[in-house]
């Protein structure tokens, strides 16, 4: 990958001239000479140390960007380059944003995802939704769209609710960033593996919509300061019967 000095920084992020758009590739790269993923190039544009986990972007959004980058085809991945400047400086320390991103990602993936992925997606979405409610909700409405997505996969919703009823201990532990990131990665995989045409277009739209959601969330929370939140919600320990569930199997399969 050849990088020139024709990158202009304006406002929150940077502008990429069409003649120097980066060539993205899947996975992590040790240096720009070996290539770049979406977030690695964002770290470069932000002036940070080369990393696919830069501080300039919200961790949940960065997780989605890495997953979309890796699960897009070589042809489709190139389109993502135009979105890179949009994630620079887009971050928040409000713990609700992580949960809003996860529930929204599940909402987008659930209706068309394969059945085995629908089970784990429904569990992840319900757990994150419950955690968000414990924090008093958020400035972005997620409940109604998520309910519509669940209604499109009734068998998966029934399975997920039975699973959570049998594992009540999940309701007494703190939800972790790793769990929300796993849910986001499962959702991206659900979109990629759905039996519908043009998966690259759907992945691009998923990331673009997540960026727009983060922008709205940050703007809304900046206008109305809120008290500090403590995240407390179901966690997802995988042991015993839960270790053999479709949810656990998909979590093990999707590690982005």
Image (cartoon, grey):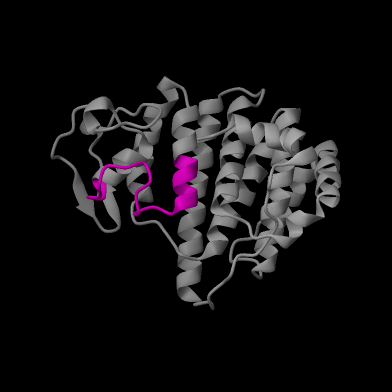
Q: Position of residue 60 (x, y in %)?
A: 50, 50
The answer to whether residue 66 is magenta is no
Number of numbered discs overlaid on the protein picture? 0
Q: Image check: 104 left or right of 15? A: right
Q: Inspect this view and state whether residue 238 appears.
A: yes
Above or below for 94 versus 191: below
Which of the 4 image quadrants contains residue 131? bottom right
Residue at position x 31%, y 32% in the image: 36
Above or below for 148 versus 81: below
Frontmost residue, 47 versus 164: 164
Frontmost residue, 134 versus 199: 134
Q: Residue furthest left?
A: 5
Q: Inspect this view and state whether residue 111 appears.
A: no
Q: Residue furthest front?
A: 240
Q: Position of residue 140 (x, y in %)?
A: 59, 61
The answer to whether residue 61 is magenta is yes
Q: Image check: 105 left or right of 82? A: right
Q: Image check: 44 left or right of 143? A: left
Residue at position x 34%, y 56% in the image: 89
Q: Position of residue 128 (x, y in %)?
A: 66, 54
Residue at position x 71%, y 37% in the image: 247
Residue at position x 65%, y 64% in the image: 232
Magenta span: predominant SS is: loop
Identify the magenta region. 45-65
Q: Image check: 20 left or right of 150? A: left
Q: Quadrant of the N terminus?
A: top left
Which of the 4 image quadrants contains residue 51? top left
Q: Position of residue 219 (x, y in %)?
A: 46, 66
């Amino acid at each position: 990958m050849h990088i020139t000095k024709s990158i202009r920084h304006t406002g929150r992020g940077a502008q990429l001239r069409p003649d120097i758009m980066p060539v993205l590739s899947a996975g992590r790269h040790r240096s720009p000479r070996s290539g770049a993923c979406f977030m690695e190039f964002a770290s470069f544009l932000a002036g940070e140390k080369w990393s696919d986990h830069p501080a300039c972007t919200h961790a949940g959004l960065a997780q989605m960007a890495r997953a979309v980058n890796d699960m897009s085809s070589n042809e489709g991945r190139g389109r993502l380059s135009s979105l890179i400047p949009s994630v620079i400086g887009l971050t928040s320390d409000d713990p609700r944003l992580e949960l809003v991103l996860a529930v929204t990602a599940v909402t987008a993936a659930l209706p068309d995802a394969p059945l085995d992925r629908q089970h784990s997606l429904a569990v992840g979405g319900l757990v994150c939704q419950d955690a968000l409610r414990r924090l008093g909700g958020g400035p972005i409405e997620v409940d109604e769209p998520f309910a519509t997505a669940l209604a499109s996969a009734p068998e998966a919703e029934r399975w997920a609710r039975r699973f959570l009823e049998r594992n009540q201990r999940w309701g007494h532990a703190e939800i972790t960033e790793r769990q929300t990131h796993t849910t986001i990665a499962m959702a991206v995989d659900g979109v990629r593996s759905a039996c519908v045409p043009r998966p690259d277009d759907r992945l691009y739209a998923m990331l673009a919509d997540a960026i727009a959601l983060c922008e709205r969330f940050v703007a809304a929370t900046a206008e109305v300061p809120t008290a500090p939140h403590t995240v407390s919600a179901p966690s997802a320990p995988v042991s015993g019967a839960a270790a053999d569930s479709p949810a656990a199997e998909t979590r093990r399969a999707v590690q982005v």
